[in-house]
Image: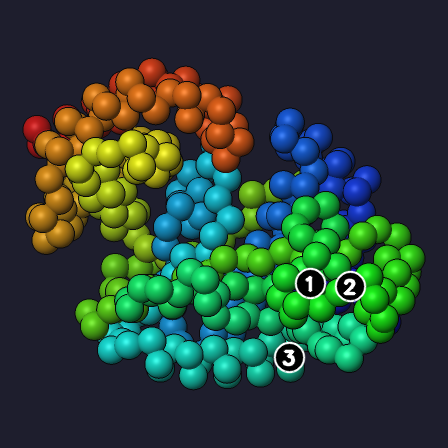
Amino acid sequence: MVEWFEPIKCWEKKLFKKESLKNIAERLGWALGYDIVEREMLYYDTMYCFLTYFPEELVFIGGSMINRVYISRGIRFSFDLDTATVKPTSGKSVMVGKLLALNEILDEKKFSIPLKIGDMELRLGEVMIDTKKDIFPDVLSLKRIVPAMTFGTPISQYIRSRYGVDPGKEPYASYISELRNLIGFMPMLEEVRIEIGISKEGFQDAVETEVRSIIEPYAEPKLRLRTKVSSLESSISVKLKNLSRSFSEELLMDFVRDLCDLRMLFLKYDREKLKSLLRNEKVDVHAVLKNLSDIRSRGKQIYENSWHLSLVRESIGWEKLCDAVERRIKRLIAS
């Protein structure tokens, strides 16, 4: 019988107890609950093994990176792993071949292990193509199947959905019951979402850095990720480009999140480099200012109610956030 958290290598196994998770959450002051702590531990492990062992150089980008590297106070909770190829890449087929090689490495390093359930087998820690989301020609959508305790999908429901079998019948029922009795809780499975952006130009504006976990210093990973990330200026440019899109209610949630991430403008950055990036990407910064008026009036409810933004709210109010970002954008335009 497999040890449930065996493929999770970045953390001490003793941390995967409700008492330990609760203690960490309390010390962090997270009112949401200890399941967020476990979610972060599983995310960090996935981030580490994917970016360390994927046999093609990748750069870590997007909101999850921004809130682990550039924003340290009042982070926005984000648990999607967004990456891009560093070298120019012509299509997905090359990356699919690399995925097969990655899983061989994960098997070898024990970041992936087999789990027998009756007459079938799934692999805990495996990375696979997310067939429901893999619909864009320039993005490879993946997911890593990880063991969980406090959130996710019960294993019985998971195998019913994925394999179309009845978990209440043999040989599955006995195995699931035995596993539950052995580990002391209903085994859950979670899928960590991963994306690889693919372009013929590649991604060059990156810096190498250490990526912290958001539950530090109250729990520290045994294995620490060091990887390439999108530069501060490039990250700001992408967020401004997102906010320059034509306003629509369907995009309001994304706009609010991007606005929160634009607290990067509060940091020291290379103004000339940023302006050059904005020119090259043809970003209309005046359109961002125009959208800010609609985002301010319509986005407050999302800001006040989204659990992803709970720590952002503790650090800054909605009106103050909108005012501060608007001032810095105007300053950028004027310079």
User: Which marked residue is nearer to the observer: mark 1 or mark 3?
Assistant: 1
As displayed, is residue 293 above or below residue 93? above
Considering depth in this image, is 287 or 180 the residue closer to the camera?
A: 180
Residue lying at 38% horizontally and 73% vertically, measured from the top left: 57
Q: Earlier in the sequence, mark 2 or mark 3?
A: 3
Considering depth in this image, is 23 or 113 the residue closer to the camera?
A: 113
- Badge 2 local density, few (<14 within 10 Å), some, or many (20+)? many
As displayed, is residue 159 above or below residue 21? below
Residue matched to label 1: 160
The quarter of the displayed image where residue 43 is located: bottom right
Residue 225 in view (yes/no): no
Residue lying at 41% horizontally and 21% vertically, measured from the top left: 301
Residue matched to label 2: 167
**Disc 2 and disc 1: Cα gap in Å?**
6 Å
Q: Where is residue 19 shown, x and y percent of the image?
A: 81, 40
Circle 3: element type: helix
Q: Where is residue 209 shown, x and y percent of the image?
A: 42, 57
Q: Are marks 2 and 1 in contact (CB under 8 Å)?
A: yes
Could you tell me which quadrant the N terminus lies in? bottom right
Residue matched to label 3: 107
Q: Earlier in the sequence, mark 2 or mark 1?
A: 1
Circle 2: element type: loop
